[in-house]
Amino acid sequence: MGMTLWIHTLENGHYSQESEDHSLMHRYSEALDALCEELKIKYLSDFFDFTDLEYNYGDEDSVQECTNDVEPDPITGLGYGIADMQWFEPADGLKTINQLHHAVSAMALPELPPIQRSQLLSELEDCLQILQTAQANNGYFHLAVLE
């Protein structure tokens, strides 16, 4: 399995980890960050959260903790909690992802094959919908990097 991004939200103490895979957003994250630089907006990768990777592939102490009978966090159901993760304001993510969506629609990243352009636009649209809801609910979000 390859690397992917999942968009997670935190709204009124409710942690949502349900997400579609956003594998193209991860695969093209360097090119998208370069586009963000041109657009003078926050990088897409500024919203990445590596907590899951660090937990699962960290140093030996972290790996040892994973193999012990660690009680899952009551909110996340994972071996780590909400406070361990990085969270961001939806308005910031909306600005970046909306501008990326417009740029990719306008044929930025000419190296993208048409089918991947369409799929990448769908991934960006999915994030926009989730971020709009998170913003309306005064929530937070991050793009979890998962393997």
Image (tube, grey):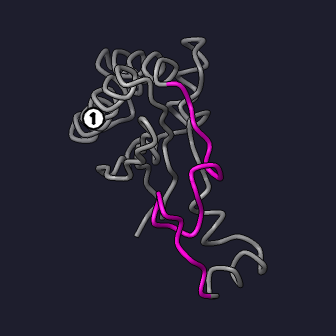
Instruction: Determine whether the residue tagged by mark 1 lies in a helix, strand or loop.
Output: helix
Res. 113 image quadrant: top left
Residue type for callout 1: Asp
Q: On screen, 73 above or below 17?
A: below
Characterize the local packing of mark 1: few (<14), some (14-19) or many (20 or more) Cα atoms within 10 angstroms. some
x then y, percent, for residue 96:
48, 20
In this view of the protein, which residue sits in the foreground, 66 or 128?
66
Comparing 116 with 11, the one in front is 11
Q: Is residue 15 above or below residue 99?
A: below
Q: Quadrant of residue 94?
A: top left
Residue 59 as seen in the image, left or right of residue 19:
right
Image mark count? 1
Residue placed at 50% from the left, 67% from the top? 78
Q: Residue furthest bottom?
A: 68
Image coordinates for residue 82, horizontal then vertical, percent: 57, 50
Q: Main secondary structure of the magenta part?
A: loop
Residue 28 spot, x, y in % from top left: 46, 41
Q: Image quadrant for the N terminus?
A: bottom left
Residue 91 magenta:
no
Residue located 59% across and 21% down the image: 42
Q: With 82 as the anchor, is 109 left or right in this view?
A: left
The magenta stretch spans residue 74: yes
Instruction: Please give the residue where the numbered disc 1 appears in the rendered image.
Output: 126
* Residue appearing at x 27%, y 34% in the figure: 126
Q: Position of residue 107 (x, y in %)?
A: 33, 20
Residues in magenta, as a range: 69-89
